Image (spheres, rainbow, N blue to C red):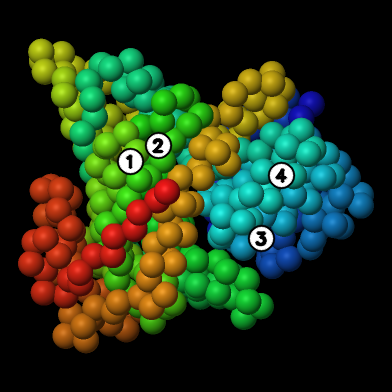
Amino acid sequence: MLKIMVAGIGGYGNYYMTNLLYGNCPENCELVGTVDPYVSDGPVVEELQSRNIPIYRTLEEFYANHTADLAVLATPIHLHAAQSAFCMEHGSDVLCEKPISATLEDAASMMNVRDKTGKKLAIGFQWSFAEAILNLKKDIQKGVYGKISQIRTIALFPRDMAYYRRGSGWGGKRVLPTGEPILDCVASNATAHYLHNMLFLMGDKTDTAAEPASITAEVYRANPIEMYDTCALRVMTKEGTELMFYASHAITAEEKHRPDFVIVGEKGSVIGTESGGITGTLSDGNIIEYGLPSSDKLRTTAAAIENNTLIPCTIETALPHLKCTCSIAESFPEIPVFGDEYIDYNEEAAQYTCKGLADVLENCWRTGKLPSETGAPWAIVPHVIHFA
């Protein structure tokens, strides 16, 4: 029986708690404990108490009383490195939520501990664990679509001020009061999956992702935060594929756009949506249906531990995404703000938005352009970042 501990049972941690407590627990797995210093009363707490599953405030308290084969970390970004290391040093394999960490230095330290302990360390970019995405990636690798020239992805997720004030108030922060970097932004957190997914699809192996050669970046904010809530990126991979990424929190609920992507290849194209599934169309008219990009990363990771098989998303897999977000943060020490004439604040929704932003980003996604290339009145000259 694989013993599992979950740290961070509120917020996204509810995904794991639902699987483990309410009927979708992986076979041969047992939840033996949880860790959360901010836990409050609620159905999950009542369920844990009814099953005599303990809730500890710290990892130290948990490991003083228990062991775990797999530690699942659904905790804030700045805690990932230290907590992953602590769990691996105490004998646990780890499934750490995305992104890897706040900095490349933290990622390197996590790799060092993993290599020293010999433990597995998975990074929870959920689409990288999805059968539909993995099958699409295999077809791309086999050349079914020929050389891929471009992938375009859009994800418009409205977020209110409560989102930025959640937990200990780390949302949207560049640096915490302690001096720790966190670099929390639209591209590193809520829509990180979809920037990473383009890099992942262009990886030459199941568990690799394409390396960025350059980024042409426009980032903005409507919210009173330290980092950006909106971005438009052109990432050129070292193999010459253009990856266009559009994401924002500064849009209204009516303008929400669930993640969609388009792949353009020599021999065909692919359209993917989170709700409608992924469909490839070849030049000869043949259609390939891949299904919905749904995944069970907990089950996949548990199986990889039990059978010593490949984990599709490791630190190495996710590192190109972190390189992108860290380099953008460094390139923009101050985030450009949409002009006052474009910013709306809805008191009832407690939300900042930018007028017309959704239409601009939708048009950019369809045409493969950046806002500055379409004449958007608030657009800035992009920053161009080159990688060695």
User: Marks 4 and 1, Cα distance to the nearest angstrom?
Assistant: 26 Å
Q: Mark 4: give few (<14), some (14-19) or many (20+) Cα within 10 Å.
A: few
In which image quadrant can residue 4 be found? Answer: top right
- Of the two numbered discs 4 and 1 on the same chain, state the one appearing first in sequence: 4
Residues marked 2 and 1 touching at CB (< 8 Å): yes
For label 3, the residue is: 79
User: Marks 3 and 4, Cα distance to the nearest angstrom?
Assistant: 17 Å
User: Marks 2 and 4, Cα distance to the nearest angstrom?
Assistant: 22 Å
For label 1, the residue is: 237
Rendered residue at 29%/45% (across/down) = 236
Nearest the eye: 207 or 160 = 207
- Of the two numbered discs 2 and 1 on the same chain, state the one appearing first in sequence: 2
Residues marked 4 and 1 touching at CB (< 8 Å): no
User: Marks 1 and 3, Cα distance to the nearest angstrom?
Assistant: 30 Å
For label 2, the residue is: 210
Question: Which amino acid, mark 3?
Answer: Leu
